[in-house]
Image: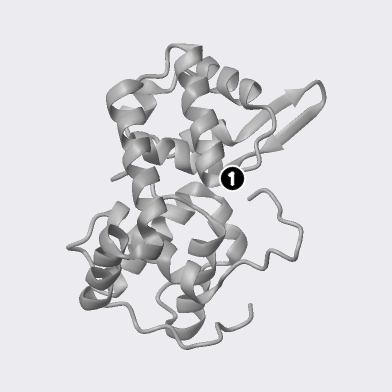
Amino acid sequence: MKNAEKEIPRPSIKQVEKYLRDWDKADDMQNYYLQEKALDKLFKDFCPENKDLSEILLKVATLNDFYSTNIYSVNSVAKHILSLNIDKRLNKADMTLVSDLQKVTVKEGVVKNFYSFATKYCSHHSPLEYPIYDIYVEKVLCYFRDHHEFFTFKKKDLKNYEMFKKVIVEFRKYYRLEKFDLKEIDKYLWQLGKKYFPKDYSKKSKNE
């Protein structure tokens, strides 16, 4: 992995608090902040369960639009979620649910892996239990692994959700950030990745 152009400050309570303030107030974060508030209302107030296909479809389509998760068959994904009867597993914070959600048959013989989307779907139902995987978070975790050796893992391990959450928990423990919940750590890591590892939009994007 190439180093970031600038050295990223060592994680600390002060650093996390700074980025959490930015999340709520910084001008360049306003769209993300408003989208998150809208998703919170959708997932927690309007459609908290996953028993009705139309409600699931609304959540899938909104997530796909807000996060640009490149799902071209939202109906297939919604039907897949409905078939899994996921509410009890969400309430129990079953980490294996992500792996069951992520692989979707979009048409006969074609299975797509929507890993990043699956983590987002679970997280918006239960943000304190399900951290979100995306490429920004991956790059930041690998950066601090290489610079501070906070935990031993390979990049491919982050695509195993149970291991991904363990890495996040070990990151929080190593840097003594236990006062922050997983959603707050998620916001911090994502903003770091966005700042220090900006996407190159000249390259064709790939589904995460």
The amino acid type, in three-letter code, at marker 1 is Ser
- Residue 30 placement: quadrant: bottom left
**In the rendered view, does 105 fall on the left or right side of 36?**
right
* Residue at the farthest right position: 109
**In the rendered view, does 153 fall on the left or right side of 77?**
left
Q: How is the image coloured?
A: one colour
* Residue at the farthest left position: 179
Residue 112 drawn at (x, y percent): 71, 36
Residue at screen point 21% across, 74% down: 13
**In the rendered view, does 205 fall on the left or right side of 60?**
right
Element on which disc 1 rests: loop
Residue 152 in view in this figure:
no
Residue 31 in view in this figure:
yes
Q: Is residue 100 above or below residue 37?
A: above
**In the rendered view, does 70 fall on the left or right side of 147?**
right
Identify the residue position indicated by label 1 in the image. 68
Residue 195 drawn at (x, y percent): 47, 73
Q: Is residue 113 above or below residue 149?
A: above
Residue 1 drawn at (x, y percent): 63, 77
* Residue at the farthest top position: 52
